Amino acid sequence: MADKFQTPKGVHDILPDDHDYYTFIKKVVRHRLRQAGFRRISTPIFEATEVFQRSIGNDTDIVQKEMYTFSDKKGRSLTLKPEGTAGVVRAYIEHGMAQWPQPVELYYVEPHFRYDRPQKGRYRQFWQFGFEVIGETDPALDAQVIKLAYQIHEDLGVADLLSLQINTIGTPESREKYQMALKDYYIGKERSLCEDCNNRLHTNPMRLLDCKEEDCRILAQLAPKMENFLDSDSKEFHEDLKDFLDGMGIKYEENPQLVRGLDYYTKTVFEFWDAKEGAQNSVGGGGRYDGLVELMGGQPTPAVGYAGGIERIIANMKREKIRVPKKDNLHVFVVQLGKDAKLKCLPLINKMRERGIKTMGAIGKDSLRIQLGIADKFETPWAVIVGLTEVREGVAIIRDMEKGIQETVDFEDIIPSIIKKIGDKSLDKYSPGELIY
């Protein structure tokens, strides 16, 4: 017997029961962001590698260790996207969105790829939802982005499980002074640093502050504080942000060690941490990136955004036994005995589906017992039974599968009878002209 294939390490199939969570999260995200005037964008699964090298930063863990990079047949370097913001900014520049009414508000729900160590809620192919506000600088916008993320978590039932961590990392100029102070502090302490942090010390010293290794965390707590190197504008911006968050009743914790792992951030940075497990189980984060559009070849343009990990949110929902609405359950199983019955029932099945009745039928089994057994396995509340006698007499039997009670109705009365039994609100109806993706 041939060996069975399995998914590669770090990726997983999304089976139907888990898709209930994904579908629910996507609907919540879509609803909240549409309310706020955001429009959906989808960028390619892969981009030119330089898009991520330039935006995320050559010295970041993502670029150094985690990108899936390959060459196409013409030798061009391409990379599966490890995060969403860089592609959105590239699209903003490429399609002249600077000429649109500002700010431009965009959101996405897409898969991303990182060669990361697989663990709970962390995969090598993972889904994120994200939203970006490009073209305006105002701490009130940062507060609104945080509020939107909070509302989404609230709708999903996980807001109380998370703590909001905020910080400001100032302007590039103030960060440069701070990085020099960090290097001076850490020089001579290399023996206490993990291997990654020893490398970061010379390339990206601020990343030492959010290392999860215990010895590195102890050193980080005693390190110089960013607030002592901030420019006055960044300080004022941060104080205004906190005022706006307080005004909206959003609780937060100031975290001077929070720096985020991407080079493009300026001023505001924030993350939502698991209240029990802390940074080890962050479900998402974001911040302001006022220099990224210019860095990518556009005009100087301020921006702020957020991205959340869908798998991580689902892990929290499952841990707390949060159930999501299901719309996949069948309403009716149509039992057909013989070819004449199938000829009669195939149009009926299609009509029922068009009316929003979720229907299964035309199963290749002739036995009444076997077909009713299948209806039981699918937990279908109603069965419509049509055999030779029913075809001849122009009727059908409607059976209550739970109570075992059945009645005979005229064939043309099947659909009205079923709708009355399941209720109009339970119908899965749509009009193609009104369908909103």
Image (cartoon, rainbow, N blue to C red):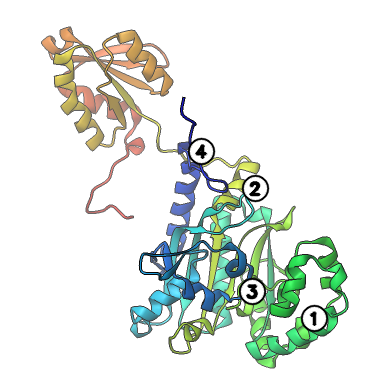
Q: Which residue is mark 1?
A: 225
Q: Residue at x 18, y 22 (%)?
A: 345
Res 18 seen here: yes
Identify the residue position indicated by label 3 in the image: 269
Q: Secondary structure at mark 2?
A: loop
Callout 2: 10 Å neighbours few (<14), some, many (20+)? few
Identified at 74% across, 84% down, the residue is 179
Rounded to the nearest angstrom, the CA distance separating label 4 from label 3 is 39 Å
Q: Is residue 371 above or below residue 332?
A: above
Residue 428, compared with residue 406, is above or below; it is below
- CB under 8 Å between discs 1 and 2: no
In primary-sequence order, the first of circles 4 and 3 is 4
Gap between marks 3 and 1, in whole Å?
Answer: 15 Å
Label 1, label 2: how many angstroms apart (C-alpha)? 32 Å
Q: Which mark is residue 6?
A: 4
> Three-letter amino acid code at disc 2?
Lys
Q: Nearer the viewer, mark 4 or mark 3?
A: 4
- The circle on residue 120 is 2
Q: Quadrant of residue 371?
A: top left
Tell me the CA gap for discs 3 and 2.
24 Å
- The quarter of the picture where residue 386 lies is top left
Q: Earlier in the sequence, mark 1 or mark 4?
A: 4
Is 77 positioned to the left or the right of 160 in the image? left
- Single out the mark in the foreground, 1 or 2: 2
Q: Residues within 10 Å of mark 1 (few under 14, many from 20)?
A: some
Q: Quadrant of residue 62?
A: bottom right
Q: Going from the N terminus, do you reach mark 2 or mark 4 first?
A: 4
Cα distance in 3D space between marks 2 and 4: 19 Å
